[in-house]
Image (cartoon, helix red, strand yellow):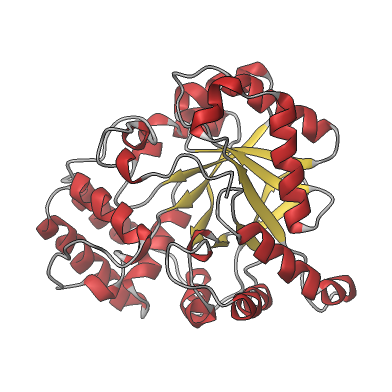
Amino acid sequence: MNAAIERIELAAGYSISRVLKGGWHLAGGHGAVDTMQAIEDMKAFVEAGITTFDCADIYTGVEELIGQFLKRYKAAFRSGDLAPVQIHTKYVPDFDKLDNLWKVDTEAIIDRSLQRLGVAQLDLVQFHWWDFNTPGYVEAALHLSDLQQAGKIRNIGVTNFDGAHVKELVEAGVKIVSNQVQYSILDRRPEVDLAAFQQKHKISFLNYGSIAGGFLTDRYLHAPAPSPPYENRSLTKYRLVIEENGNWDYFQAMLVLLRSIADKYEVGVAEVAARWGLQSPMVAGVIIGARNQRHLQKLKKLSGFSLDEADLKAIRQLISQAKGPSGPVFDLERDKAGKHGRIMKYNLNEK
């Protein structure tokens, strides 16, 4: 069942693993982090073929942690004992500074990421903007383009951008290779809002939320609906996404269906959910927040099977019964007064 981890060319001459190791869970909101164990886990992921890591300037301590990993195994990378890695980070200006953001501010954050990671060039910078009612996002993206021309950035992507605003950046001349979005069996907003435009302009999706922070796993099959407080920030976030779909009974029906498909391939519910994402149009990769190397055996199975048309049809039929979420990508989350927006942390760059 295990096969080599699939790879894809995200941009000309730039190859990534289609399963990406997420970094949010290392920022402290999912429990204490053992630095040396986290570094050894990164090594194990690279050895397994998962060479692409996702992080962000606002994930507290994560860029520094990856930087320590790169430094510790510098000789192994040089000798070829470890395959080259690709580090995707984000540029997320603080909400409170959006209306007074200058090129010098953007460059300072990019320089900080370079310093934290200990690299001469960032492989991919994914740009996020909290509030499109605040002008300046086009200018900030163009500042990233300037830094790309200066050699500090190899590729530019966006994250949580809806169709109208991706179009605006493209028309301004920003060369975007990817859009990192919440995209899963439980959230299909990118299909409606973005897919056609991104296909035309060869902008790939990088999916987060593929297994809904752990909800789309066998752990919750036939389990009663959990009550807050939840054990980590991911579960808090994705419990709201489940509510957008409908009630807990609908979610259980989804898990039962995914389990029946999983039985056919001798895998778990999570692998079927992630495989669905990998087989969706324009998806380059799925970001999985695997906490440690104990998850590697399951992740290796993702390249060993494909969902057939009967599987996909059954999933589509059940998806058609979902109530939501609806609207443009990340629109619900941009509403600071709404239940999705209230759990966000908007000003993290000073940490």
Expressed as whole percent of the image width and height from the top left, the position of residue 187 reads: 32, 46
Q: Is residue 261 left or right of residue 115?
A: left
- Which residue appears at 63% of the width and 49% of the height? 89
Judging depth in this view, the residue of 317 and 229 nearest the camera is: 229
Q: Is residue 80 left or right of residue 139?
A: right
Q: Is residue 274 left or right of residue 284?
A: left
- Which residue appears at 33% of the width and 46% of the height? 343
Q: Is residue 17 visible?
A: no
Figure check: 67 above or below 112: below
- Which residue appears at 45% of the width and 39% of the height? 346
Expressed as whole percent of the image width and height from the top left, the position of residue 161 reads: 49, 32
Number of on-image labels: 0
- Which residue appears at 85% of the width and 74% of the height? 80
Kindly indicate the quadrant of the structure image that contains residue 223: bottom left
Judging depth in this view, the residue of 319 and 171 nearest the camera is: 171
Expressed as whole percent of the image width and height from the top left, the position of residue 345 reads: 43, 44
Q: Is residue 39 visible?
A: yes
Expressed as whole percent of the image width and height from the top left, the position of residue 142 reads: 70, 24
Judging depth in this view, the residue of 217 and 5 nearest the camera is: 217
